[in-house]
Each structure stands twice: as structure tokens, then as C-alpha cells.
Image (cartoon, rainbow, N blue to C red):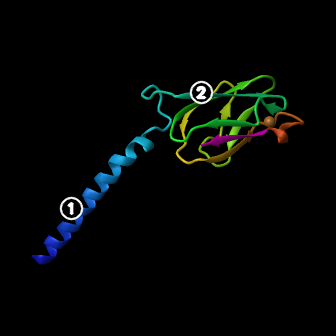
Amino acid sequence: MFRITWVFGIIVAYVILLTACGASKNEEVQSGSGEGSETIANEVVITAKNWEFDKAEYRIKKGEAVKLTLESGSGVHGIAFEDLEIKELRSGDSKVVTINEAGTYEFSCNIMCGSGHANMKAKLIVE
Ligand SMILES: [Cu+2]
């Protein structure tokens, strides 16, 4: 009998702990790539052309939903991030992302677009 009470006590404590953590974390985690339901605070338009991006650095705030759009100035390009889930964003594509960790995320063109392809790199700075 003592043992059952003890186990039950642990379960109750665990559930309370889970609920407490879940409530505070939820807001951050929820904002993934959902569309429509959340307000998009920011939009970042990355313009790719032969053979560079319009900026070397793009800045966003951590924890905020940002719509990333890739546009093409000339040529056919795409972008992929090394350290993010975004592995394929093509010209005309948009993706809503929320990055909760500050840092510098490098991306590069992921379509073999010609002689300057290897130079097509830029950074997304999350602060
Ligand atoms: Cu390329």
C-alpha cells in the first residue's frame, strides 16, 4: 500500500511539472510554419540574381514569425540553410519561420546556376 501511494505521488508530481513547463513554453513552440493563424511581424525578401544576393546579411528577431520570400532578379536560384529546416526555397516561394535561437545562419544557392554559383552565399542573423 505504501508503495502504491509513493508511485502515485511521483506521477502526480510529474504531471504538475509537465503542465507547468508546457504552459510557459507553448507560445514559443507553437509558432512554426503555420499560415494565417498568427500575425506575421516581419517579411524578409531575399532577391537572388546572377550571381549574388541583394544583401550579404538579413536580420530578424528571435522568436518572431517572419515570412521569408525568395525572389529572382535574374537567373534561376534557390536557397538552402545549413543549420535550419529550410533546405529548399525556390524563386517565388515563401516560408513562415520562427527561430528561437539567436545566431548567424548561413545559406547558399542550391541550384547549379552557372559560373558564379559558388559565391552565392549570405547570412540570416537572428538577434
Ligand atoms: Cu546557384
In percent of width and height, residue 67 lies at: 57, 29
> Secondary structure under badge 2?
strand
Disc 1 CB within 8 Å of nearest ligand 1 atom: no
Q: How many numbered badges does the structure rendering display?
A: 2
> Secondary structure under badge 1?
helix
The furthest residue to the left = 1
Quarter holding the C terminus is: top right
Spatial CA span between label 1 and label 2: 44 Å
- Main SS class of the magenta portion in the image: strand
Q: Which mark is residue 12?
A: 1
Q: Amino acid at mark 1?
A: Val
Q: Amino acid at mark 2?
A: Glu
Q: Nearer the viewer's eye, disc 1 or disc 2?
A: 2
Does the stretch in magenta take in 123? yes
Q: Which of the 4 image quadrants contains residue 75?
A: top right
Quarter holding the N terminus is: bottom left
Depth order, front residue of 63/34: 63
Depth order, front residue of 8/42: 42
In percent of width and height, residue 4 lies at: 14, 72
In percent of width and height, residue 106 lies at: 70, 45
Vertical relation: 111 (above or below) 105:
above
Q: Residue at x 25, y 57 (%)?
A: 16
Vertical relation: 66 (above or below) 26:
above
Residue tagged 2 = 43
Q: What residue span does the magenta drawing correspond to?
A: 121-127
Q: Which of the 4 image quadrants contains residue 7?
A: bottom left
Vertical relation: 15 (above or below) 81:
below
